[in-house]
Amino acid sequence: MGDILYRDTGKFTPDRLVADNAIPLTTKGITVAAGQGTLKRGTLVGPGEDGSYRVTGSAEKDGGGKTCCDCILADDVDTSGEDAVVTAAYVTGSFNRGAVILAEGADIGSYETDLRRLGIFLKSVQEY
């Protein structure tokens, strides 16, 4: 037998975002609005009026006057450029409530019912 070649495709660092596998993780491609800086994996985002995604809890509101929530970023995203960025986001799954990121001052509890209806469930994960 010949040598087996391994290719380094990146490193996975556990971040405790995903709480468990009771709810299947599914993703979709989204366009994140430019000008939000670097958004971290685990950031809760929702579509603005133009359809591009923004951090939940930010000034962008949906038609009902409440900031949208729709999905959780699966990867870090740099939006500091002029153009919007296409990336992946989780649309279903079970996530650690302490690892989900919102805009400063926003409360995850105010979005939990909406997220549950979408198939995103939040759990408190005990740190060790």
Image (tube, helix red, strand yellow):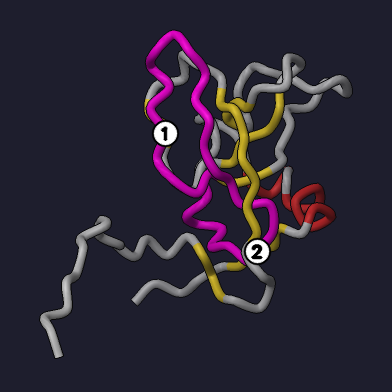
**For this view, does 37 lie left or right of residue 28?**
left
Q: Which residue is mark 2?
A: 93
Is 98 rendered above or below residue 82?
below
The quarter of the rendered structure image containing the C terminus is: bottom left
**Is residue 78 covered in magenta?**
yes
Number of on-image labels: 2
Q: Residues within 10 Å of mark 2 (few under 14, many from 20)?
A: many
Q: Is residue 4 magenta?
A: no
Three-letter code for the amino acid on which mark 2 is drawn? Gly
Q: Which mark is residue 105?
A: none
Q: Residue 127: name its quadrant.
A: bottom left
**In contact (CB < 8 Å): disc 2 and disc 1:** no
Q: Secondary structure at mark 1?
A: strand
State which region is magenta.
Answer: 73-100
**Circle 2 — which element?**
strand
- Which is more toward the observer, 16 or 49? 49
Task: Give the vertical position of 16 relative to 113 (above or below).
Answer: below
Name, please, the residue furthest toward the front: 1
Residue 45 image point, x, y percent: 62, 36
Q: Quadrant of the N terminus?
A: bottom left
- In percent of the image, x 39 and y 21: which residue is there? 37
Which of these two is toward me, 109 or 43? 43
Instruction: Please name the residue shown 77% across and 59% down the image.
Output: 119
Which label sits on residue 77?
1
Instruction: Name the spot of residue 100 as percent of width and height, x first.
Output: 52, 50
Residue lying furthest right: 64
Q: Amino acid at mark 1?
A: Val
Q: Is residue 88 above or below residue 83?
A: below
Farthest left residue in view = 3
Task: Compute the Cα span from label 2 to label 1.
Answer: 20 Å
Other-residue count near label 1 (Cα within 10 Å), few / some / many at <14 / 14–19 / ≥20: some
Say which residue appears at 47% left-offset and 60% top-offset: 17
